[in-house]
Structures are given as structure tokens and as C-alpha cells.
Image (spheres, rainbow, N blue to C red):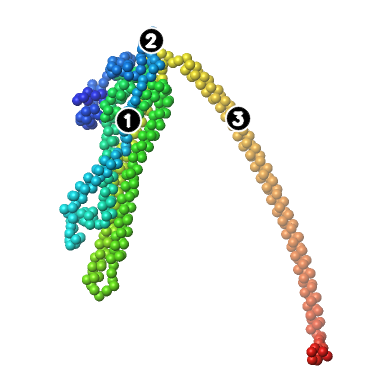
């Protein structure tokens, strides 16, 4: 639905579900409520939309965007001269200034410690008597330098989140602009493309530098040159990826802070434990006061260790919530821009040579040639599919036959091998039995010989010759 700002009369648009919401006018920054009365909507253009667009376009459009002249047939035709445009320098839509965010973070850092300083308890006050503000002041002030670093990184990150939120607000305000008014024409073609581009260039400087306006401007200028909806669609898709990468890359420093804050907490834990261990002095066990002082220093070190880790984890968790919410809102903003380009801009682009002319004969011939080639391709594809089905069926049959042959051969070879193994085992058993029988006969004969020798006495006498001196007889 479309409506006008009651203050500056700028033509605006919004989705029907936004009826009744209070928004700020992108032109004058005045708060207004989106009307729900159909009478507030701007009337839809009739068939003479391009003529209305010519009346509502700026007076300098004809001199700015080329030479539009009348032909003998009464239709407007675009001459060979193309408009010369410089566009405008695009600001970064998602990455805020590092130095500005650093300044905001420093101011928040000083303000926070200025609030806590009056509540800083004295060292003589026992921790059991701290109230809530004194406990916070002691945690942020009386611990090591780690807590100061964690707090500074947190405030710097919050400064970045604030600036990114302002940039997102600017992008959301640009979505209310009526970038493609129906008064200039229901269809966007070569006759009225200059009027649409003029309308984009005449938007307020503060608002035309946004993701949506820049993308639509690039799409219109490309369509003016190429006269191709597919080319514009491809460019829109590429630009969508570029914008998504730019928005995603703007969170790099925030992710570093989200990683560094708990790491600093762990460093504080190590420092606290080192302080606690180094302060232990039990060399004189009889000195009670010395032992109590040593225990006090140990507990102080342990308190530093635990408090730095606790502060780092809490600050990281607090930072995660606005960071995730902001990322979700920026993704929704990109999705809304993509939906506008795909659902509104691209369907209104008309690839014609003129307002009432038929497509060129070359285009008809090209379409017919493409259609004929497509028909032949489909016929060939069907024939190829039939042949592939036949090949597949033949392959299945051959596979079944081969499987049957392999199974039969395997069974035959297994049966033959089993028969051969049985015969071999039989021969081995027979030879083993024969060998055992021969061995038994030999043992019996040996027993007989031993028995005969046992009944006789055999004397073995060895004659030793005596030798004289030096081995001589």
C-alpha cells in the first residue's frame, strides 16, 4: 500500500501488515502512523501510465537521460546517445568507523568507572560486609589489570553495536521509499526507463545511499543498456551475495572481542593463582599472625582468579545477545531487499523495443530457432533414453546369465575338489596304516633279538699297551 507523509508529502509505501505502526518519515524524519484507510492509498495508474510518468518526471529528465524524440508513427524511440551518469559514492552499509566506535567505547568506559568509584570499599572493610554496589566496585577496580581490559573491550564492542544499529535503522528507513512509483508506468521498458532512473537520482541524498536504492539503481541502469531481464536478475543475485558478505564481514571485530574477553578472564585466573601460590609462607609454623596473613593473601589471590574469570564470562554472554539480535535483523533486512527485487522489480521489466511495438523479427527467429533446437534435443533425448533402457535390460540379462554360469562352475569345482580331497585322505590313511604295520613288525623282531642277547654273556676286553719314557716302548 502507498501513502504520503503529512509533513513533507513524500510518496511512501509499506506492507499491509504494517498498518497502524508508528514510523519515521525517511525524508523529514517526522513520526507518522501508517494509515489503513484505502482512500489514503495512491490510485493505480491506467493504461496511459507512461504518459502520467512523463508529466510527473522532473523537467530536466529529457536532457539528463538521453534524446527521446518522436518518430513518424507517433511513438517515442530512444536514440543512439546514452545518458552519462556518475552515480554517487556509496558509503559502507554495515561497517562503522573504528575510531568513532573506539571513542564511544572510551566514553562508556570512563562513565562506568566514574559511577563505580564512589562505591569502592576501603581495603580494611571485610568482603562479608559489602553491599551489591561495593561488590561490583571491588570486582572492577580492586582486581588486576585484566578486569580493566575486559571492561574496555566490552564497551568498545557496545560502541560498534550502537553504530551498526544506527546504520541498520537507516537501511530500514529506505525500505519505506517508493522507489518504483506506479505513476511512471506499470511496466518498465525502454520508453520510461529514464524517468525511473531520474526518480531514483532525485531521492534525498541522505536516503538514496542505501542497499536497496543502490541495488535498484544498478539494476535499472543495467536494464537501460542491456534490455535483458536475465542480465538484471544475474546482477541482482551477485549484488545480493556481495551485500551479504559485506554485512557478515562487519562482525569480524565483534567476534574478536567475543573471543578475547573470556580469554582475558582465564589469564586473570592464572595470575590470581600465581599470586595465591607465591604468597604462601609457612616457614615459621609457630607464628600465628604470620600464618593468618599468609592465608589472607592466598584467599585474595584466589578471589582475583575467580572474579576475573566470572567477569569475562558474564561480559561475553551479555555481548552475545545484542550481537546475535543485530545479526538477525540485518539478515532480515537483506531478505526484504531480495524479496522486493525479485517480486516487484524483475516482474515489471519489459524486454521490448518500444511501448506498443511487437518484438523484433530477429528475436522471433531466435525464439523459433531455440524452440526447434529444443524440440530436436528432446526427441534425441527420448531416443537416447530408450537405447539406454535397452542397454540396461541387456546388461541385466547378461549379468544374470554370467551369475548362473559362475555359480554352476563354482559348485562343480567345489564338488570335484571335495572328491579329490577324500581320495587323497584315503590314500594317506592307507599308507600310514602300512607304515605303522611295518614299524610294529620291526619292533617285534628287535624285541626277539634283545631277548636272545639277554640270555648270553658277552665279554668285551680291551688290551692296553704300556709305553715307556718319551712315548717309546
Q: What residue does disc 1 label?
A: 89
Q: Secondary structure at mark 3?
A: helix
x and y percentages locating residue 432 in the rendered image: 75, 65
x and y percentages locating residue 201 in the rendered image: 30, 24
Outermost residue toward the top? Answer: 72
Q: What residue does disc 2 label?
A: 71
Which residue is pictured at 33% across the width and 29% down the height?
214
Q: What mark, if any, has residue 200 been given in the picture? A: none
Instruction: Tell whether 245 sits left or right of 119.
Output: right
**Mark 2 or 1, closer to the camera:** 1
Seen from the viewer's position, the closer of residues 367 and 281 is 281
Q: Is residue 282 above or below residue 396?
A: below
Q: Is residue 227 above or below residue 116?
A: above
Badge 3 crowding class, 10 Å Cα cut-off, few under 14, some 14 to 19, many 20 or more, is: few
Measure how far apart labels 3 and 2 are at the Cα level.
58 Å
Which residue is pictured at 21% across the width and 48% down the height?
110
Q: Are marks 2 and 1 in contact (CB under 8 Å)?
A: no
Q: What mark, if any, has residue 387 been given in the picture? A: 3
Amino acid at each position: 500500500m502507498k501513502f504520503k507523509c503529512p509533513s513533507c508529502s513524500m510518496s511512501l509505501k509499506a506492507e499491509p501488515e504494517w498498518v497502524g505502526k508508528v514510523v519515521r518519515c525517511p525524508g523529514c524524519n517526522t513520526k507518522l502512523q501508517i494509515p489503513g484507510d484505502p482512500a489514503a492509498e495512491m490510485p493505480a495508474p491506467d493504461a496511459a501510465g507512461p504518459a502520467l510518468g512523463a508529466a510527473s518526471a522532473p523537467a530536466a529528465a529529457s536532457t539528463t537521460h538521453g534524446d527521446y524524440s518522436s518518430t513518424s508513427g507517433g511513438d517515442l524511440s530512444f536514440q543512439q546517445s546514452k545518458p552519462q551518469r556518475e552515480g554517487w559514492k556509496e558509503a559502507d552499509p554495515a561497517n562503522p568507523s573504528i575510531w568513532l566506535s573506539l571513542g564511544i567505547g572510551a566514553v562508556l568506559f570512563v562513565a562506568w568507572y566514574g559511577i563505580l568509584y564512589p562505591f569502592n570499599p576501603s581495603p580494611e572493610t571485610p568482603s562479608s560486609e559489602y553491599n551489591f554496589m561495593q561488590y561490583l566496585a571491588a570486582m572492577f577496580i580492586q582486581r588486576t589489570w585484566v578486569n580493566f581490559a575486559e571492561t574496555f573491550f566490552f564497551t568498545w564492542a557496545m560502541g560498534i553495536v550502537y553504530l551498526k544499529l544506527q546504520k541498520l535503522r537507516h537501511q530500514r528507513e529506505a525500505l519505506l521509499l517508493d522507489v518504483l512509483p506506479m505513476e511512471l508506468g506499470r511496466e518498465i521498458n525502454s520508453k520510461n526507463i529514464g524517468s525511473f532512473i531520474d526518480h531514483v537520482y532525485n531521492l534525498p541524498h541522505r536516503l538514496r545511499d542505501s542497499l536497496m536504492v543502490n541495488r535498484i539503481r544498478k539494476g535499472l541502469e543495467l536494464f537501460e543498456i542491456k534490455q535483458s531481464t536475465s542480465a538484471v536478475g544475474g546482477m541482482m543475485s551477485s549484488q545480493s551475495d556481495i551485500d551479504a558478505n559485506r554485512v557478515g564481514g562487519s562482525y569480524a571485530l565483534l567476534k574478536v572481542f567475543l573471543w578475547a574477553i573470556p580469554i582475558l578472564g582465564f589469564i586473570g585466573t592464572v595470575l590470581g593463582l600465581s599470586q595465591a601460590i607465591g604468597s604462601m609462607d609457612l616457614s615459621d609454623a609457630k607464628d600465628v599472625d604470620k600464618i593468618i596473613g599468609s592465608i589472607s593473601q592466598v584467599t585474595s589471590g584466589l578471589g582475583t582468579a575467580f572474579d576475573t574469570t566470572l567477569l569475562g564470562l558474564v561480559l561475553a554472554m551479555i555481548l552475545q545477545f545484542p550481537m546475535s539480535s543485530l545479526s538477525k535483523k540485518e539478515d532480515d533486512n537483506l531478505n526484504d531487499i531480495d524479496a522486493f527485487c525479485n517480486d516487484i522489480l524483475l516482474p515489471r521489466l519489459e524486454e521490448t523495443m518500444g511501448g506498443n511495438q511487437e518484438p523484433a523479427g530477429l528475436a522471433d527467429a531466435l525464439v523459433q530457432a531455440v524452440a526447434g533446437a529444443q524440440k530436436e534435443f528432446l526427441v534425441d533425448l527420448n531416443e537416447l533414453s530408450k537405447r539406454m533402457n535397452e542397454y540396461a535390460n541387456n546388461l541385466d540379462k547378461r549379468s544374470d546369465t554370467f551369475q548362473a554360469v559362475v555359480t554352476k562352475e563354482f559348485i562343480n569345482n567345489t564338488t570335484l575338489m571335495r572328491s579329490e580331497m577324500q581320495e587323497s585322505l584315503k590314500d594317506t590313511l592307507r599308507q600310514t596304516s602300512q607304515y605303522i604295520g611295518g614299524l610294529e613288525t620291526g619292533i617285534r623282531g628287535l624285541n626277539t633279538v634283545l631277548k636272545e642277547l639277554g640270555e648270553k654273556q658277552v665279554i668285551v676286553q680291551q688290551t692296553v699297551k704300556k709305553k715307556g719314557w718319551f712315548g717309546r716302548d
